[in-house]
Amino acid sequence: MTTIKIGTHKEVGPMSSIFGNAEARVLDQSLLVGNMEQTISMLKQSTGLSFSTVQRVVEKFVDRGFMKPTRKIANAQAYVFNVDNDLHEMIEWATKYQLTRTD
């Protein structure tokens, strides 16, 4: 698991504020993009993670049903977050938790 240096819980997304790892950084993007298609390169740019780290996380999320591949955009595979499953509830819980923190 990759640990990422992050700011305070008020400066990062809800999952990153709790877990602070690469998986959390990618999950936080689901709040911003919803079910809009994203490529590995797009997620790399928006999270600040390396291409290989994002690729590993996306593969893990596809296996677990958090994301699914859609179509090829040029030579890049596009993916969408599966916001219709339990992922949405988990992100919503993390957001509420983040907003109630006082530290």
Image (cartoon, rainbow, N blue to C red):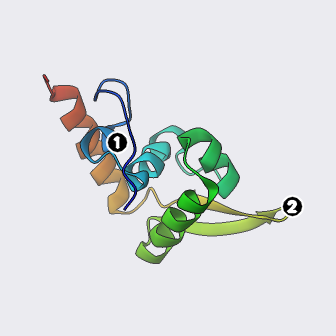
Task: Give the vertical position of 22 relative to 11 (above or below).
Answer: below
- In the rendered image, the quadrant that contains the N terminus is bottom left
Which amino acid, mark 1?
A: Ser
Q: Which mark is residue 35?
A: none
Percent of width and height locating residue 102: 13, 22
Given the current orientation, which residue lies at the most extreme right position? 74
Front residue of 87/40: it is 40
Q: Is residue 76 visible?
A: yes
Residue behind mark 1: 16
- Regarding residue 39, the answer to whether it shows in the image is no
Q: Dot 2 surroundings within 10 Å: few (below 14), some, or many (20 or more)?
A: few
Taking the image as shown, residue 103 lies to the left or right of residue 70, namely left
- Report whether 55 appears left or right of 63: right
Looking at the image, is 17 positioned above or below residue 56? above
Which is in the foreground here, disc 1 or disc 2?
1
Q: Residue at x 45, y 55 (%)?
A: 83
Along the line of sight, which residue is nearer the eye, 84 or 9?
9
In the current view of this chain or complex, which residue is farthest to the bottom? Answer: 63
Inter-mark Cα distance, 1 to 2: 31 Å
In the rendered image, residue 48, in percent from the top left (x then y), is placed at: 56, 41
The location of residue 90, given as percent across then percent down, is: 28, 52
Reading the chain from its start, which is encountered first: label 1 or label 2?
A: 1
Pointer 1 with pointer 2, Cβ within 8 A: no
Q: Position of residue 28 (x, y in %)?
A: 43, 44
Residue 6 appears left or right of 96: right
Q: Amino acid at mark 2?
A: Ala
Q: What residue appears at the point 16 percent right and 27 percent down from the top-left corner?
A: 100
At x 31% / y 24%, what residue is drawn?
A: 10
Under circle 1, the secondary element is helix
Instruction: Provide the residue designation for mark 2.
Output: 74
Quick one: quadrant of the C terminus? top left
Is 102 on the left-hand or right-hand side of 89? left
